Amino acid sequence: MLELDPLPCWKYLTEEQRRARTAALVEDVESEVAARRKRTGAKPLGVAAVLAQSPLQRPKKTKKSPAPTFHAASKAVRLELRDAYAWFVAAYRAAAEKLRAGVRDVVFPRGSFPPALPFVDG
């Protein structure tokens, strides 16, 4: 039997309370899907159709959109991450330019690796 530890945020709950919350979450998802199916007219495949599919067959249509640069909980967080990354890149490029100009005590952004210095035979 597989034994799962409770989610850290639910550790203080009793097992019965955790089961009730899990059931409520599943019920929410099922009602959202039912509403979407009603809106779009989509129907589930069913057991026979799923079992008839080959697991090795490729889908007829695939999504062509590129992966997002950042996965985030909201658009605001995604934009904040994008801005932070832009700052990081600008700071790195400025530091690399100083290094190329001969400044040896330049500080690179935290978490980055400076480019290698040119080899000097000496």
Image (spheres, rainbow, N blue to C red):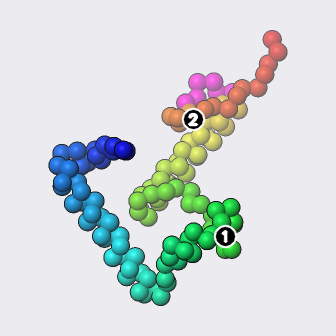
Q: Are marks 2 and 1 in contact (CB under 8 Å)?
A: no
Q: In front: 110, or 55?
A: 55
User: Who comes first in sequence, dot 2 or dot 1?
Assistant: 1
Side (left or right) of 49 relative to 54: left
Local SS, label 2: loop
Number of marks in the rendered image: 2
Is 2 placed above or below 119 here?
below
For the point 26% across and 65% down, the residue is 24
Local SS, label 1: loop
The stretch drawn in magenta includes residue 106: yes
Q: Quadrant of residue 5?
A: top left
The numbered disc on residue 112 is: 2
Instruction: Point out residue 45 in the picture as x, y percentages from the top left corner.
Output: 52, 77
Q: Which residues are magenta?
A: 102-107
Q: In front: 51, or 95?
A: 51
Instruction: Point out residue 90 in the picture as x, y percentages from the top left corner.
Output: 58, 46
Q: Is residue 106 visible?
A: yes
For the point 49% across and 50% down, the residue is 84
The stretch drawn in magenta includes residue 62: no
The numbered disc on residue 35 is: none
Is 2 placed above or below 55 here?
above
Q: Amino acid at mark 2?
A: Ser
Is 78 placed above or below 111 here?
below
Q: Amino acid at mark 1?
A: Pro
Q: In front: 91, or 72?
A: 72
Residue under pointer 1: 59
Instruction: Point out residue 100 in the picture as x, y percentages from the top left corner.
Output: 70, 32
Q: How far apart in space, not on screen, are marks 2 and 1 (Cα)?
A: 40 Å
Q: Quadrant of residue 61?
A: bottom right
Q: What crowding class fits label 2: few (fewer than 14 Cα within 10 Å), some (14-19), or many (20 or more)?
A: few
Q: Main secondary structure of the magenta part?
A: loop
Q: What crowding class fits label 1: few (fewer than 14 Cα within 10 Å), some (14-19), or many (20 or more)?
A: few
